[in-house]
Amino acid sequence: MNRWQYFLGGVKNMKTRGTIAPTSKFTSKKMLSNIRFEDAKIIVELGAGDGSITKHILSQMREDTKLISFEIDPALSGILEENISDPRLTLINDSAEHLVQYLNKMGYTKVDYVVSGIPFVMLPEELGDRILKVSKSVLSEKGCFIQFHYSLIPKKRYKRIFNQLDIELEMRNLPPAFVYVCK
Ligand SMILES: C[S@@+](CC[C@H](N)C(=O)[O-])C[C@H]1O[C@@H](n2cnc3c(N)ncnc32)[C@H](O)[C@@H]1O
């Protein structure tokens, strides 16, 4: 998908995509710097889009680590499937709110990291809270939830749901992004 197609898709589906440009490699790098890849066995990605963060996760993951990526939009999920073929990746074309059911089907109860690009500020509040709480519930003791936003407005929400929140700014993104790291 080229930048123009991504832009048009973003304008058309603003309520679920929440952006007109894929996340930059700088933001991806900043998000993923919070992952101890040498220890991670299971990583979950929410809102994978066309795979701009997915490919960076895979490039740093160990050979025996599993990545489970959710993407609700069938068009983006199809593109991701065409672009990335990796036996460590399980792509799920469904809403992240069903995370626990999918993990249970795969025989997992806990995961090491959840990396998310879901635009929670655009989703109905109740749905967003449910996805955040479900994500928190499956995190292992040392795990963390990593999210990006384009403002500090959602800060209170993360403080309410998680026990600990750290925020880093990445200017090299369109628009500049805040990386939220939650435990
Ligand atoms: C801001 S885009 C991020 C795409 C990509 N990860 C990136 O960083 O460039 C947000 C993505 O979340 C997806 N999304 C929105 N709601 C979702 C949900 N409930 N479950 C799974 N994916 C969802 C959208 O379809 C969209 O692809």
Image (tube, grey):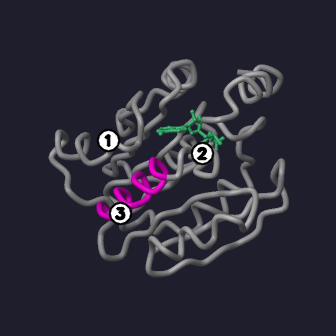
User: Marks 1 and 3: CB-CB under 8 Å?
Assistant: no
- At 58% across and 51% down in the image, what residue appears? 120
Q: Nearer the viewer, residue 173 or 121?
A: 121
Tell me the residue that label 1 is attached to: 98
Report whether 87 appears left or right of 20: left
Residue at 65% in and 54% down: 28
User: Of the residues tagged 1 and 2, which is closer to the observer?
Assistant: 1
Tell me which amino acid carries mark 2: Ile
Amino acid type at image mark 1:
His
On residue 53, which mark appears?
Answer: 2
Q: CA distance from mark 3 to mark 2?
A: 17 Å
CA neighbours of label 2 inside 10 A, class few (<14), some (14 to 19), many (20+): many
Label 1 neighbour load within 10 Å: few <14, some 14-19, many 20+: few
Q: Which residues are magenta?
A: 126-138
User: Which of the labelled discs sits on residue 112, or is there none?
Assistant: 3
Q: Foreground: 69 or 150?
A: 150
Q: Is mark 2 within 8 Å of ligand 1?
A: yes
Q: Quadrant of ligand 1?
A: top right
Mark 3: C-beta under 8 Å from nearest atom of ligand 1: no
Residue nearer the viewer, 52 or 124: 124
Q: Quadrant of the N terminus?
A: top right
* Residue 126 horizontal/vertical position (percent): 46, 51
Q: Main secondary structure of the magenta part?
A: helix
Magenta span contains residue 57: no
Say which of 47 and 154 sits in front.
154
28 versus 53 height, above or below: below
Label 1 beta carbon less than 8 Å to ligand 1? no
Residue for point 35% across, 33% down: 87
Instruction: From the viewer's perspective, tell me whether residue 167 is left or right of residue 98.
Output: right
